[in-house]
Image (cartoon, rainbow, N blue to C red):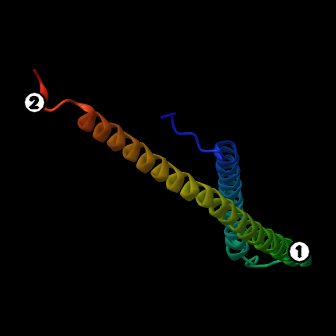
């Protein structure tokens, strides 16, 4: 009997590669999301650590503090938008990875079924050959 060959082996390899690429893209998107969240937390911490001037203060010091608070608030807003877009990107890449995994697993199941059928056929052929050999051997009583 000839050796096993899955007729969709190339497609299976392509689908597995697509799944790996989708997983890598998801990992990159998750890394970007972690970075965006860290930057947002850092911006919030900088705003929280901004202290108003104490003692005798000038109008310029008050104005500087207000301007700094406004810049930090803008920075937080930008970081929040970046985090939201990173979350959206993660959701999209997770969906793409899931779909690639489904396509890959369908082919893997087809390969497993095909391999099992091939194995069963090989076993059947082997048993048939053994039966033929056993039935074609002369019996001990028939020997001269």
Side (left or right) of 122 relative to 41: left
Q: Is residue 130 above or below residue 81?
A: above
Observer-nearest residue: 55 or 115? 115
- Residue 98 is situated, as x and y percent measured from the top left of the image, at 65, 65
Task: Residue at 86%, 74% (x, y): give it.
Answer: 74
- Residue 136 is situated, as x and y percent measured from the top left of the image, at 27, 33
Q: Is residue 111 above or below residue 59?
A: above
Label 1: few (<14), some or many (≥20) within 10 Å?
A: few
Q: Which residue is mark 1?
A: 67
Task: Residue at 41%, 50% (x, y): give it.
Answer: 120
Say which mark, if any, is on residue 144. none
Say which mark, if any, is on residue 140. 2
Side (left or right) of 32 relative to 65: left
Location of residue 104 (image quadrant): bottom right
Q: Is residue 19 above or below residue 90?
A: above
Q: Is residue 104 above or below residue 48?
A: above
């Amino acid at each position: 009997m000839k050796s096993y060959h899955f007729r969709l082996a190339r497609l299976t390899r392509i689908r597995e590669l697509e799944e790996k690429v989708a997983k890598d893209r998801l990992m990159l998107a998750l890394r970007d999301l972690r970075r965006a969240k860290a930057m947002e937390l850092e911006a919030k911490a900088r705003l929280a650590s901004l202290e108003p001037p104490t003692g005798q203060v000038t109008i310029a010091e008050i104005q500087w503090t207000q301007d700094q608070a406004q810049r930090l608030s803008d920075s937080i807003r930008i970081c929040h938008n970046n985090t939201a877009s990173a979350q959206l990107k993660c959701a999209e890449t997770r969906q793409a990875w899931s779909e690639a995994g489904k396509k890959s697993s369908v082919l893997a199941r087809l390969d497993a079924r095909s391999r099992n059928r091939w194995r069963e056929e090989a076993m059947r052929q082997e048993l048939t050959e053994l039966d033929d050999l056993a039935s074609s051997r002369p019996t001990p009583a028939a020997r001269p």
